[in-house]
Image (cartoon, rainbow, N blue to C red):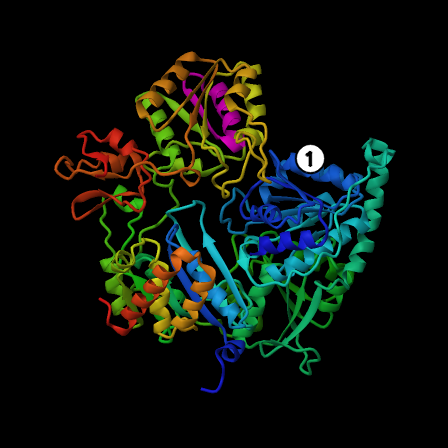
Amino acid sequence: MGNHAIAAGAIRAGVGVVTGYPGTPSSEILETVVKRNPGDIYAEWSVNEKVALEVAAGAAYAGVRSMVTMKQVGLNVASDPLMSLAYIGVKGGMVVVVADDPGPISSQTEQDTRTFAGYAKLPVLDPVSPEEAFEMIQDAFELSERLGMPVLFRPTTRVCHGYAPIEVGERTHEPGAGAFEKGSRWVIFPRLSYVNHKAIEERLPVLAAELSSYRFNTVEEVRGGALEHDPVRAVTCGIATGGVSYAYAREALSMLGADCRILKVGTPHPFPVDLAERFLRGLDEVLVLEELDPVIERELLMVAAERRIPVTVLGKRSGHTERAGESTVESVAAATAALLGVDAPVVPTCSSAPQPLARPPVLCAGCPHRASFYAVKRAMRGKKAVFSGDIGCYTLGNAAPLEMVDTCLCMGAGVTIAQGLERAEPGVTHFAFIGDSTFFHTGIPGVVNAVYNGTDIVLVVLDNSTTAMTGHQTHPGLGRTAQGEVAERIAIASVLEALGVSHVETCDPLRLEEAEAAVKRAVEAGGVSAVIFESPCIAVTAPGPMHAIDQDLCTDCQVCIQRLGCPAIMRAGGVVSIDTSLCYGCSICAQVCPTGAIGVAR
Amino acid sequence: MNDSPAAVLDRAVHDLIFCGVGGQGIVLASKIVAATALAAGCPVKTAETIGMAQRGGSVTSHVRIGRAAHAPLVPLGSASAIIAFEPAEAVRCLPYLAPGRGAVVVSRRAVPPVTAALTRSEYDGSEMLGYLRECGERVIVVDGDVVCATCGSPKVLNTALLGAAAEAGVLGFSTDEIEATIRCTLPERFVEMNVQALALGAGYTRGDSE
């Protein structure tokens, strides 16, 4: 997996401190560091990306090579320290790995970390494949240490989650103990910021010139669909690309058997302008193939304008490629065929095929969130309420039949959006659902705000004892660390009580009646009140007894199906049944069945 | 045939699509094939498309064998085999199949999405299997329930499908090669049941399992 390759490359490059917050598609990088740790690397799941970046920066201040991992939206949380760190710089090589998610496949935004790098004035490396990611991450440490500034490393989902074989080899650099040298350079003041800003602006063009000969920035010639080193035939069309789009472009050219010049950009910022000029000279038309922002496209337009190269640059700005979403071989082949004036490859169509039903992701059978949502729904039946949600598996509570997530914005926003809604519409009960890991990530300041400013909201903490969505990482509420050591367990109930939440009650959502009563008491309490629903994720706990439907008692009323939407309950041939391969024994269907037809399977 | 499979794969790309529902063992099946390819000295790329949830959503795993494969995802119309753990998912992924040059290996058992029960529409997979049989491509239907019951584990559907695809000659590897990978990668207590499932799966292709 690309993420394994990134971890292996970082270990080989002598990384000493690795921090991060889980987020698809980045999570396996830190997990792999933990798994393959030779014993001299410190790795932690930090409480959020800002904290993670700062811990990694501290280590790099002392001269230790450090790495911090996150997904693209995590960089928003970490942007405060990152922007300043660009000015302050580091001593040990520090790589900020930010995984982008074109599509998006599992994210809130399609933001482009290459654009962020330009804004933060930091170098960014953009690997094509897992193999290249392994090499490039090692270069990133060298580059960071040489420049004395953090370097961004930006794989996308297809690189992170693609698999390819690599040879790891011996370490080239050993992590050692750091030594922090005191000095004024570590304290950011306006005067220092001015001086450092100027230095950065002077350094970037020099670096851009150097990067024109970087091994992963290349100009290649393709003839008849394959690479050719000294081609005889000249071409007038080129493709400029980077990241996984390069792989799609090569595939498309090979399918079309076409002639073309390719610029592959491994460092979108600072842009290798001299190499770009060599690429552009002699070409009439250039198609830019890149996902998300038109970063390469803008740079090429500037190079062409500044160096007076008469060339037409086609891409997102000209409407020749899509501005949003992920590229595919087919979309790239169609755009390439249009550029070259040849027919696009024929894509088979099955117009007569029956339309399979949509299969959206759902809360698992036995998921305790289903019970929590249903308990709140029942408690609020007939009453006006708004349910603010947050980021995690429980965002899926939005789907029918639960329909219990009315808002979802970003990590930690459920508890704060609810406060704004309450100010605007005080007569309604405002709920905020938040998961345990999200509570620690950015939930706590929102609760402080609610208590301090005297808001009236009901906080529902969905504590499933894990960070489920991203693959079950640890968090401060669990009593163990990323490296498997015992840690102080921070109890969410104690935190809420300490913050002055008026009413805090913990209960098991799988006992529906008790859970419903607890919600009603919290609503009655007024002010900032909280219910903590404690029940572990099915992935981290043993199943309960399988349930079955007694067909003699079942009246086919389908209450279980229509209220809960559990994937284990199905109806075929007029008979409702429970799929024993999916049932996890949560028993809530038995608790809602009006005829007592559901019970433990005999 | 003079060329070794490795030499053939060096020139051509052998694409495979594995599809089904999260939790069915799709990714493991693609990893077994990838490990077999590596053992035979063939470069291999795999990629998974998994949605948000841990379970229950559509899952597709792309396997590309051969040095000439650039993109991480299989292009439409180029897969030698669609190895489908569920009839509707087979239909969903059918556009990946190389027309007239491959086969669809599909598990008979339908997995109804929650949306089916909620909209009170019944789905049993028969319409999907009917379409597959009529679509003009080679289709091999494996009765996963029978295989799993015979082998005593609900987790062997993936190896049964691999057995059927290998026997049909569309996997790029023989059942013996897949068996060798199973023997050296799976925990010992699971090896025999998976080897048995592999053989039973192959039987569906030959027509002697029903």
Task: Residue A273: say if magenta.
Answer: no
Image position of B174 with respect to A3: above or below: below
Q: Nearer the viewer, residue A240 or A356?
A: A356
The image shows a total of numbered marks equal to 1
Picture coordinates of residue A592, whole percent (x, y): 25, 30
Task: Residue A417: say if magenta.
Answer: yes
Q: Which residues are magenta?
A: A412-438
Q: Residue furthest front?
A: B188
The residue under label 1 is A80
Image position of A519 with respect to A304: above or below: above
Q: Which residue: 68% across, 79% down?
A: A234
Q: Residue furthest left?
A: A552
Picture coordinates of residue A148, whole percent (x, y): 80, 46
Q: Nearer the viewer, residue A68 or A357?
A: A68
Count neighbours of disc 1 (C-alpha within 10 A) and say few if under 14, some if 14 to 19, many if 20 or more.
few
Quadrant of residue A254 within the rendered picture: bottom right
Quadrant of residue A543 within the rendered picture: top left
Quadrant of residue A257 within the rendered picture: bottom right
| Amino acid type for the residue under numbered disc 1 | Asp
Q: Is residue B92 visible?
A: no
Q: Which residue: 56% across, 61% down?
A: A320
Kind of element beneath mark 1? helix
Q: Which residue: 55% across, 65% down?
A: A248
Callout 1: chain: A
Q: Is residue A547 visible?
A: yes
Picture coordinates of residue A445, whole percent (x, y): 59, 24
Picture coordinates of residue A294, whole percent (x, y): 62, 54
Q: Quadrant of the N terminus of chain B?
A: bottom left
Image position of B192 with respect to A258: above or below: above
Q: Quadrant of the C terminus of chain B?
A: bottom left
